[in-house]
Image (spheres, rainbow, N blue to C red):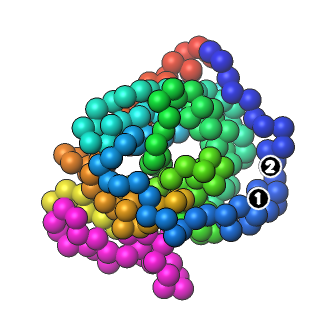
Amino acid sequence: MKITGIPAAWPDSEAAALAVQDELRGKVVLDEPGPAPGSGLVTGVDVAYDDERDLVVAAAVVLDAATLEVVEEATAVGRVAFPYVPGLLAFREIPTVLAVLERLDSGPGMVICDGYGLAHPRRFGLASHLGVLTGLPVIGVAKNPFTFTYEQPGPRRGDSAPLLADDGAEVGRALRTQNGTKPVFVSVGHRVSLDGACAHTLGLARRYRLPESTRHADSLCRRALKEAQQASA
């Protein structure tokens, strides 16, 4: 089991991490539409932890956006890179996520994180952080709204409602991906519009509430974590 190392200059304190967020947040690109929905490749990324063993596992699953067929899979195992601090979770995950993306031969295309982009207390969640560091178009599709408020969208697939910050700014959307199911929460990470992010999410969630990218990456990540735990036992 090869374990990915933590970069030498990686922040090791809350103050240092906040300074990095402040520096990188201004580099988020919000004025590009992003790839056309249903075209090219899309890559789902997910992360799982074992804090007792100091392990973090990242999985990446590349899909053909038109057919939703799996093109490639990869996993990476690393050490937890940062203590648990709400709002700074990306610093625990990014080194291993970067490592797993580097292992893809096909190239990731657009990346979908199981998490947040602008829908983050400091407007810089994992999807934004990853996008700025890689230059890739990235969106966040989360299972809950974090600290933001929203009205329930309509009951039909494709119905949506703004996800609002305390100052009234729209930081994402609550999006109904299947009739009568709970919405998912879509936010821009980098180099994709919010309309485009929602269209991609609907295109990837043709049968289930969650995008196929998230479903595949979550399953692979769980298997990889179990294998890493067994190898370190």
Numbered disc 2: secondary structure: loop
Whichever of labels 1 and 2 marks the residue nearer the N terminus, that label is 2
Q: CA distance from mark 1 to mark 2?
A: 8 Å
Numbered disc in front, either 1 or 2? 1
Q: Quadrant of residue 230?
A: top right
Q: Is 179 on the left-hand or right-hand side of 174?
A: left
Total marks in image: 2
**Residue 124 located within the stretch drawn in magenta:** no
Residue at 36%, 36% in the rendered image: 63
Numbered disc 1: secondary structure: helix
Quadrant holding the C terminus: top right
Name above or below for residue 233 compared with residue 130.
Answer: above
Name above or below for residue 42 compared with residue 74.
Answer: below
Task: Residue type at mark 2: give it.
Answer: Pro
Q: Which residues are magenta?
A: 147-173
Is residue 89 something one can see in this rendering?
no
Residue at 51%, 18% in the rendered image: 227
Q: Which residue is mark 2?
A: 11
Q: Position of residue 27 (x, y in %)?
A: 67, 64
Task: Residue type at mark 1: give it.
Answer: Val
Residue at 20%, 73% in the rendered image: 154
Crowding at dot 1, Cα within 10 Å, few <14 / some 14-19 / many 20+, comes out as some
**Residue 162 located within the stretch drawn in magenta:** yes
In the picture, the disc for residue 20 is: 1
Q: Position of residue 197 (x, y in %)?
A: 39, 60
Q: Position of residue 117 (x, y in %)?
A: 53, 60
Q: Position of residue 53 (x, y in %)?
A: 65, 27
Crowding at dot 2, Cα within 10 Å, few <14 / some 14-19 / many 20+, comes out as some
Quadrant holding the N terminus: top right
- Cβ atoms under marks 1 and 2 closer than 8 Å: yes
Name above or below for residue 20 compared with residue 41.
Answer: below
